[in-house]
Image (spheres, helix red, strand yellow):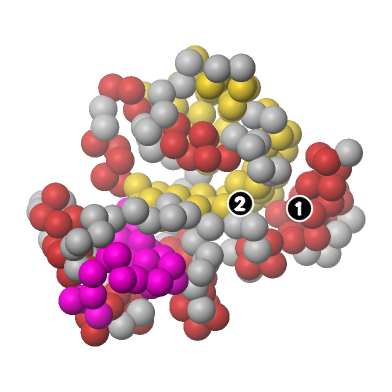
Amino acid sequence: MITIKEINKRFGKLQALDKVSLQLNSGECVALVGPNGCGKTTLIKTILGMVRPDAGTVLFKEEDVRNSDTYRRQIGYMPQIGRYPEHMTIGQVLNMIKGIRSDETSLDLELYDQFGIERILQKRMQTLSGGTTQKVSAVLAFLFHPQVLILDEPTAGLDPVAADLLKEKISKEKKAGRLILVTSHILSELEDLVSHVVFLQEGKLVLHKSTPALKSDTGESTVARSIVQLLKSAAI
């Protein structure tokens, strides 16, 4: 579904991405991991078209994303920190986004209902806790039935019940054939979700493997412990 070919991106003296090539397919839940500053955010923003690479190509369903921005309508993005107009209420933000996507007649309101968003529609964004803002971001990411979900630290700030509801939703969408790309510093939360791991270090692709292959190669029983071992090796 998404093909990344020899992507390079430099910011001044920093080589953020160095000839990164990946194939990401429908039905996969891919953990994007690596040390801080390894290029994860740059890669995500490159896929979203928010960063233009210096070289290389990103294909969405075999079409070069540089030729069109309509592919983004098929991606649901949940940022690590959602930034919304502070003076607007939750209801106004939701209506604004739905207005932009006015051609979308079918909405996924499962998280909207489970998080009880209807009860707090009149709250202004500037008054929300980090966890409630995360709930709004999650609702928006899933709202239009996207074929691809990019979730950056999705459970950060969520209470345990909300985090569990979100993980159940991610699992359901994976089974429905969505491609899911997720980052998380809480490695144990990835265990039951992730089918593949992509490991970046200093802008380079170090590893892209299925979770069974990763656990076999590292000799660990869990994805979390396998990733910790990779991170320790990267720090040496």
Along the line of sight, the residue nearer the viewer: 5 or 124: 124
Q: Position of residue 103 (x, y in %)?
A: 10, 52
Specify the label residue 227 is tagged with: 1
Q: Identify the residue at image location x=78%, y=47%.
A: 231
x, y (%) of residue 92? 15, 64
Residue 2 is labelled as: none
Q: Nearer the viewer, residue 119 or 48?
A: 119
73 relative to 96, above or below: above
- Label whose residue precedes the other's in the sequence (1 or 2): 2
- Magenta highlight: main SS: helix
The local crowd at label 2, few if under 14, some if 14 to 19, many if 20 or more residues have their Cα within 10 Å, is: many
Numbered badge on residue 31: 2
Evaluate if marks 1 and 2 touch, with contact meaning CB atoms under 8 Å apart: yes
Q: Residue at x 24, y 84 (%)?
A: 119
Are there few (<14), some (14-19), or many (20+) residues within 10 Å of tag 1?
Answer: many
Location of residue 87 in the rendering, given as x and y in whole percent from the top left corner: 20, 61
Q: Quadrant of the N terminus?
A: top left
Residue at 43% in and 67% down = 130
Q: Does residue 51 lie above or below 96 as drawn?
A: above
Q: CA distance from mark 1 to mark 2?
A: 10 Å
Coordinates of residue 198 in the picture (x, y in percent): 65, 43
Span highlighted in magenta in the image: 120-146
Does the magenta run of residues contain 112? no
Q: Amino acid at mark 1?
A: Ile
**Residue occupying image coordinates x 74% and y 59%:** 223
